[in-house]
Amino acid sequence: MAKLDSLKSLNVFKYFEEICNIPHGSENMNAISEYCVKFAEKHSLKYIRDDANNVIIFKSATAGYENAEPVILQGHLDMVCQKTEDSTIDFMNDGLDLYVDGDFVKAHNTTLGADNGIAVAMILAILESDNLAHPEIQAVFTTDEEIGMIGAGKLDMSVLTAKKMINLDAEEDDTITVSCAGGSDFKAVVPLNRVKQTGTKIAVTLKGLKGGHSGIEIDKGRVNADILAGRFLNHMSNLADFDIIAINGGDKGNAIPNLCLIELCVKNPDTFTKNAEMYFEILKKEINERENDFAPIIEMGEKAEYDVLHSDLREKLIFTLVCVPNGIVEMSADIKNLVETSLNLGVLSTEDDKITLLFTLRSNKKSALRFLEEKLKTFFKTIPCKVYTSGHYPPWEFKEDSILQEVYKEVYKDICGFEPKVEAIHAGLECGIFTSAIKGLDCIAIGPALYDVHTVNEKLCISSVEKIFNVLISLLKKCK
């Protein structure tokens, strides 16, 4: 990091390097929380640390800002831990190995954790400085954001008096985010009734699909492997006699499945294979422009006796996969090109005694999210199963009369020469939890340019940090 001189006088990258030296993956929050406490004590700042390891640090207003409304600066302390196969890092105990590559900071063979370590570093640099003009700052560092915004959900918001909040968890430096989706998980568990059936085992693998994030890529036309499996089985049920042994696709509710494995017991394997190959050619032509790497595989196994789903359950499962809502449900009427409500069948798994279907639901409106849950509950009344909802987090609804949005756009234009893009996202931010808990909270989300976040190729743009940090301190100066 010796080559990194940008913002040296304000110590942003000094703090970022210190943060990266501390293990701080999700569910490993004690050390990074303690680091924030030690910082507050060193600089004689009041702080609160709660049982979830969230830390709030308070800094008084500077001269001339004593009567200004306080401002919340917010980021999260945890990072996503990913590494290459040959990396020897122990994320529970080791720091990251940082290096500079041109205008970027990267980490050798691991994620960088700039999401959201750079936010914490910028906030600490502001808290440390004695020559920046600002109102009272209530700096909020939350924990375990990456695994469900757990820390923010446990935070006592009553200690926060501010009605303005700047979240620093955005990843595009030319954009101001003003709304995000809320979400929940919906699970249907179908008990299995198996019977014995003799036939040839055929394994069909639907592979080569792109998959992706169920919020960010839900509008990209990505094909869901589990839903495609239902379409395939429904078509084949009119052409061949088969039973289902198992069907498995996807391992995360919030990821569009790019692979699904179907195991079948087939009476006439040659007829089945011939018709399946013909149908796959039709599907390839249909989806080629968006899924040009789709490469299904058919493998024939042995003829034997197998435990298969009862025929009634087979029909109900196929009906479910063909007819259950999936993908975009509603586009926003308020914000152009924004997916307002969607759902994704992310996991379809077969065990000895049950089949589980796990959906991730998203909406930028609370009422629409509730209705989507009700819609799925109504749909699954047609199948003997149990349904569960969990992991609820609220949306951050667009605030039309936001003063903070207008001031930020003005400051950004003064510094950068053009207005930032205004964006609502169909993914979750902690802003939704804060705006739900603090009545009337005016909130924006900003941040420097990050690339390939949550992967070993993650990188942070150095000049972008400088730009956004300058915009941030100018924004605070305007908050009188």
Image (spheres, rainbow, N blue to C red):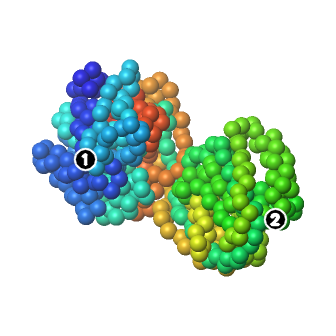
Q: Is residue 286 left or right of residue 120?
A: right
| Three-letter amino acid code of the residue under disc 2 | Lys
Nearest to viewer (mark 2 / mark 1):
2
Query: Circle 2 is placed at which residue position?
Result: 267
Quarter of the picture holding the N terminus: top left
Q: Is residue 44 left or right of residue 175?
A: left
Q: Residue at x 30, y 37 (%)?
A: 96
Residue 466 quadrant: top left
Kind of residue at badge 1: Asn
- Secondary structure, mark 1, is loop
Q: What is the C-alpha distance between the residues marked 2 and 1?
A: 55 Å
Residue 93's mark? 1
Q: Horizontal and vertical percent for residue 394? A: 49, 61
Circle 2 residues within 10 Å: few <14, some 14–19, many ≥20: some
> Residue at image x 71%, y 70%?
305
Q: Secondary structure at mark 2?
A: loop
Residue 281's x, y, as percent? 82, 43
Image point 31% across, 41% down: which residue? 89
Residue 197: x %, y % from top left: 74, 73
* Vertical arrangement, residue 324 with respect to residue 387, above or below: above
Front residue of 136 and 9: 9
The percent position of residue 26, horizontal first and vertical second, equals 35, 53
